[in-house]
Image (tube, helix red, strand yellow):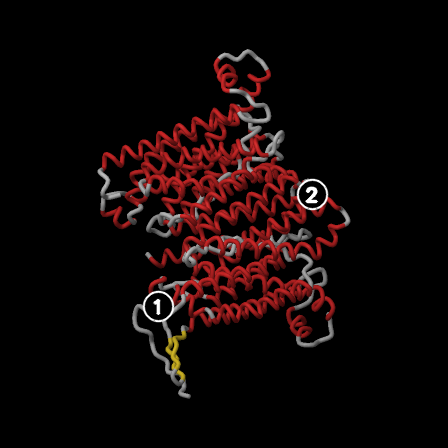
């Protein structure tokens, strides 16, 4: 094994963001760009800090240092940290990571910066299923308690998967075209959104209000039973997706070039789209359709990393940071009122995206 | 296409336009005639021309006529706005709400209910209209800030960002105020029935101005769709052309959604259908889209009255159930015309 040999990249291979290293180990060689790695590491550090802050804040405040001590095995405050607050923070991080990754895949496959799992029909399908359960389930009175704990996440997962896979199947015609996928997805999403709003006008306003909380995306009252399914699904899906990342790179060159490189284009694209659907469905089932994370995280990561295309790992980390940070604000910034996290992700994420947009244009001109 | 002589092509397009116009008249008459109380055509005629004050005349003049007029107005406006917004952003996903217009209208309405306690529809639609204008100006400013003017991609991103921001704020407000939620959910579902007929003459000037600006914008948009650099080298000033288009989109969408609710779906589907008929030339695409929008909206409304007799389903849900599958079938059947 030889040690890595740093080399500067040929001019023009990187649009912004400077250096790139070529690593050669035995017969394998690949390029490493330090900036995405720095961004990912800094993001992880920020995530840990935000999670500790989030665990510490509440009716019974705990300092950041004490939180870390408890997590590393300290007995102090064990119940509050491990049973009450950590599951919520973990759910937020996992959901955000899943949405960020899913959004990065969707934008890369569709080659459209407005694409997100919403466009694949997942979130709107999940919303329809959940609103249906809430509006009709409320009518049976006693059942609503059970439905609230068991039915809603299940309905969300089922609705999201059905709509996502439905979009995928409807878009398939002699292969999977990214453009057609997006158009079909928009059609399905629009149908589902209209059905959702119509369902909301049927029930009384209290039911509609409760359903609105879920539709906005909320982490209120999430426990370990919410963490486990997301964590399990992510442990499976994230490595699979990252393994497929080099296929995504080839797909980005265009179908013909990708085929020329020996890639089975339709198979690769199908697997990636289904992975994005599954990631988004799992995330949506456990926290509701947290808005904007899947759309903004890849775009933010792209600009932070200075790359030309949404980076997968960067989007994952940015998604998690965005969600946990937003939940921290939603939980603590408004005095007694605890807002759903989706309100804050939208209200915070949007100006940041606008800022990045403005700044990158200033630099370009 | 290239083999067809220009005169024949124009005749062909005029024939399609004529066909669409006749179809629009057909659905208009059907919309006045069909409903819980079926009114035969002679009855419609007598109610319109020389009313005698019978129950039938009353239904036509005070219920069906305003409803049909709102449908025509909103359908035409949203169809044209959809074609314009897809042309200006060069994005097939764009709907007239993309530039923040729909969410701006919704946010202003919800805010007026939340802070001022406004309850009169005729008052808060003006808040909605104002909100639509402000949001659209904000998106255009953000999309063109930093020099270089507004490009399709920055417009789309700025629009998405502002829309999401406003949507987040709306979600927060309606969770705090059930009165606002109650108005908002019905507004989101969209309706052309039961609107106050006095609103019609109030919004009509804005829609007419918007339609005029849209048609005036068509030749410029044709040049712009060749790419901004080509357009510039052909002597076209990009900035004013874009601004004219955005103004038209705002007027059309703002007045339609303020009165009839979030029916922007019309503007998403219709241009794809119209483009299949007209090709990419906006001088034909825009009128086709306007007529098709009116046909789709009124058609969906009529269908809603038929399927659930003697009650009816709102136009929003019918639009989704008819227009959605139609849109998907269209996308699947043929290679979509790219922008």
In depth, the one of B74 and B241 nearer the eye is B74
Residue A15 place in picture, x, y as percent: 34, 65
- For label 2, count other residues whose C-alpha is less than 10 Å away and answer few (under 14), some (14-19) or many (20+): some
| Up-down relation of residue B167 to residue A113 (above or below) | above
Q: Is residue B128 visible?
A: yes
Residue A59 place in picture, x, y as percent: 71, 60
Residue shown at 56%/30% (left/top)?
B193
Residue B121 place in picture, x, y as percent: 57, 30
| Up-down relation of residue B26 to residue A311 (above or below) | above
Residue shown at 61%/59% (left/top)?
A328
Residue shown at 26%/36% (left/top)?
B9
Does residue B229 appear left or right of residue B185 in this picture?
Answer: left
Do discs 1 and 2 belong to a common subunit?
yes
In depth, the one of B247 and A294 nearer the eye is A294
Q: Chain of mark 2?
A: A
- At mark 2, the secondary structure is helix
Number of the front mark, 1 or 2: 2
- At mark 1, the secondary structure is loop
The earlier-in-sequence mark between 1 and 2 is 1
| Up-down relation of residue B132 to residue B91 (above or below) | above
- Residue bearing the label numbered 2: A206
Does residue A36 appear left or right of residue A331 in this picture?
Answer: left
Q: CA distance from mark 1 to mark 2?
A: 54 Å
- The numbered dot on residue A128 is none
Q: Are marks 1 and 2 in contact (CB under 8 Å)?
A: no
- Residue bearing the label numbered 1: A14
In depth, the one of A238 and A75 nearer the eye is A238
Residue A150 place in picture, x, y as percent: 70, 57
């Amino acid at each position: 094994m030889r040690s890595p040999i740093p080399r500067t990249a040929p001019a023009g291979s990187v649009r912004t963001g400077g250096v790139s290293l070529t690593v050669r180990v035995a017969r394998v060689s690949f390029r490493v760009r330090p900036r995405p790695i720095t961004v990912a590491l800094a993001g992880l550090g920020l995530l840990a800090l935000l999670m500790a802050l989030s665990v510490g804040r509440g009716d019974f405040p705990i300092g950041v240092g004490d939180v870390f001590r408890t997590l590393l095995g300290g007995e102090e405050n064990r119940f509050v940290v491990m049973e009450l607050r950590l599951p919520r923070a973990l759910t937020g991080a996992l959901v955000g990571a899943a949405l960020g990754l899913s959004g990065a895949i969707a934008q890369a496959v569709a080659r459209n910066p407005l694409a997100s799992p919403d466009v694949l029909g997942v979130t709107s399908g999940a919303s329809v299923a959940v609103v249906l359960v809430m509006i009709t389930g409320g009518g049976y009175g006693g059942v609503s308690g059970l439905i609230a704990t068991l039915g809603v996440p299940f309905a969300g997962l089922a609705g999201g998967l059905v709509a996502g896979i439905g979009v995928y199947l409807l878009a398939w015609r002699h292969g999977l075209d990214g453009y057609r996928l997006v158009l079909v997805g928009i059609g399905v999403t629009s149908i589902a959104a209209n059905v959702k709003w119509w369902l909301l006008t049927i029930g009384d306003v209290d039911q509609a209000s409760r359903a609105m909380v879920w539709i906005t995306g909320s982490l209120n009252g999430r426990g370990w039973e919410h963490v486990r399914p997301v964590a399990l699904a992510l442990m499976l899906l994230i490595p699979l997706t990252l393994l497929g990342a080099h296929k995504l790179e080839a797909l980005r060159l265009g179908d013909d070039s990708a085929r020329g490189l020996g890639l089975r284009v339709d198979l690769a694209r199908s697997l990636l789209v289904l992975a994005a659907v599954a990631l988004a469905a799992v995330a949506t089932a456990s926290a509701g359709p947290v808005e904007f994370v899947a759309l903004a995280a890849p775009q933010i990561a792209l600009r932070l990393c200075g790359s030309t295309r949404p980076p997968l790992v960067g989007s994952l980390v940015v998604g998690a940071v965005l969600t946990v940070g937003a939940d921290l604000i939603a939980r603590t910034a408004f005095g007694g009122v605890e807002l759903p996290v989706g309100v804050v992700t939208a209200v915070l994420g949007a100006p940041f995206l606008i800022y990045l947009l403005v700044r990158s244009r200033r630099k370009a001109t | 296409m290239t083999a067809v002589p220009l005169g024949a092509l124009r005749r062909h397009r005029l024939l399609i336009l004529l066909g669409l116009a006749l179809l629009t008249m057909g659905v208009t008459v059907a919309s006045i005639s069909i409903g819980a109380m079926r009114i035969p055509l002679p009855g419609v005629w007598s109610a319109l021309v020389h009313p005698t004050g019978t129950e039938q005349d009353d239904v036509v003049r005070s219920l069906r006529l305003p409803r049909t007029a709102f449908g025509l107005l909103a359908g035409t406006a949203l169809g044209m706005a959809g074609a314009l917004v897809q042309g200006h952003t060069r994005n097939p996903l764009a709907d007239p709400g993309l530039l923040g217009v729909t969410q701006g209208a919704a946010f202003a309405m919800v805010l007026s209910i939340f802070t001022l306690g406004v309850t009169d529809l005729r008052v808060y639609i003006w808040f909605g209209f104002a909100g639509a204008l402000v949001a659209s100006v904000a998106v255009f400013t953000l999309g063109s800030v930093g020099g270089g003017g507004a490009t399709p991609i920055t417009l789309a991103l700025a629009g998405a960002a502002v829309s999401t921001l406003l949507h987040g704020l709306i979600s927060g407000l309606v969770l705090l105020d059930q009165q606002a939620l109650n108005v908002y959910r019905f507004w989101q579902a969209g309706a052309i029935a039961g609107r106050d007929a006095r609103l019609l003459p109030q919004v009509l000037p804005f829609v007419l101005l918007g339609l005029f600006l849209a048609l005036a914008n068509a030749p410029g948009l044709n040049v712009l769709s060749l790419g901004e650099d080509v357009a510039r080298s052909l002597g076209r000033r990009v900035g004013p052309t874009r601004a004219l288009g955005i103004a038209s989109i705002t007027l059309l969408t703002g007045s339609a959604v303020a009165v009839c609710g979030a029916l922007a779906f019309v503007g998403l589907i219709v241009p794809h259908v119209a483009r299949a008929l007209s090709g990419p030339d906006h001088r034909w695409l825009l009128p086709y889209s306007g007529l098709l929008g009116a046909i789709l909206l009124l058609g969906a409304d009529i269908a809603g009255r038929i399927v659930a007799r003697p009650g009816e389903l709102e136009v929003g849900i019918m639009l989704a159930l008819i227009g959605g599958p139609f849109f998907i079938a269209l996308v699947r059947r043929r290679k979509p015309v790219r922008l």
